[in-house]
Amino acid sequence: MKLIFLDIDGTLTEPGSNVPPESALKAIRQSQAAGNLVFLCTGRNYAMLEPLLKYGFDGMVASAGGYVTVKDEVLFDCPMPEEEFRTAMKVLHDNGVFCTVEAKNATYGDENLGEFLSESDGDNSEIERWRRALSESLNIRPMKEYDGAPVYKIVIMCREAKQLQPAKDLLEDRYDFVIQEIKEHGSCQNGELINRSFDKGKGILRIAEHLNVPIEDVYGFGDSMNDLTMIETVGTSVCMANGAEALKKRSDLVVPSVSEDGLYRGFEQLGLLK
């Protein structure tokens, strides 16, 4: 039995979409029929990945590793301590950083975030996901509606890296600032603030250990820098052709883009369909 972990945006689907290519679904079904298990491994919270659960995944590493399941069994559930969340939000907002906060069942975004993104030049799947999510109203609620539910991570966006430095000075010992790759003259810094107690790689290890599957039988497919811990953890790592150049260099295999049947071709090349 092999374990296969799939990022969503830019890997399983076009960024911001909830509809995988038919070729990707064919690969997943054939691989499961061969006795393998296929998991989502995503920065999305439960609410934003839920539309994909109808495709029959075997569990998830959600919220960048903060919420981990096998079938209906929860293996790990680790929201931010409330005091640390409040501290992070204050220092980020004080320095002009736009934020979205992800609870399990809802996502809340700062006012004017859509305007900021429309004026920003970014070139990675996470930026495109948020543009699409906001333009199509994919359950991104206004920050003023935040109800105090436990938060798993904070997505951060700003013009300049120096805006993040005060938050790093205060929080970097406990939180990893995962910043996405941007093109040379990009005008948007974007990434995630993630508790060092978890990441995608740690989530994968929790599932592999629970199922007693050796890491050499674990595969991971991703495209952006928030997939780095997954790529560094699995036995065989795969990056999509549409992915970050830095991630490609660290991956064992690069496959065609999500829009060019990359998942199916990767599964086929790695012998995961039989």
Image: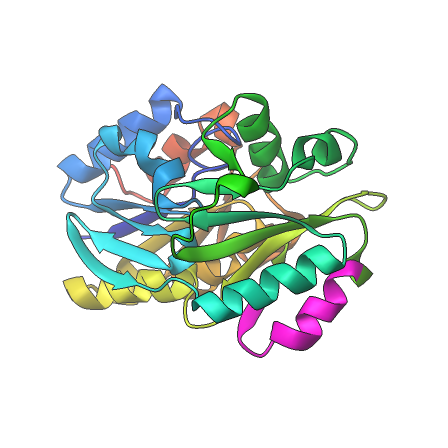
Q: Which of 152 and 217 is in front in this view?
A: 152
Instruction: Note whether 98 is above or below 215 in the view shown.
Output: above
Residue 9 position within the rendered picture, expressed as x and y whole percent measured from the top left: 49, 37
Query: What range of the chain is rendered magenta?
Result: 163-176
Instruction: Note whether 174 is above or below 48 in the view shown.
Output: below
Q: Residue at x 42, y 72 (%)?
A: 197
Q: Residue at x 18, y 65 (%)?
A: 210
147 in magenta: no
Residue 40 position within the rendered picture, expressed as x and y whole percent measured from the top left: 33, 44
172 in magenta: yes
The secondary structure that most of the magenta stretch takes on is helix
Residue 116 position within the rendered picture, expressed as x and y whole percent measured from the top left: 74, 36
Q: Which residue is drawn at 83% across and 46% down?
A: 184
Please indicate, yes or no, whether residue 181 appears anywhere in the rendered image: no
Name the quadrant of the C terminus: top left
Q: Residue at x 34, y 62 (%)?
A: 203
Q: Which of 163 and 190 is in front in this view?
A: 163
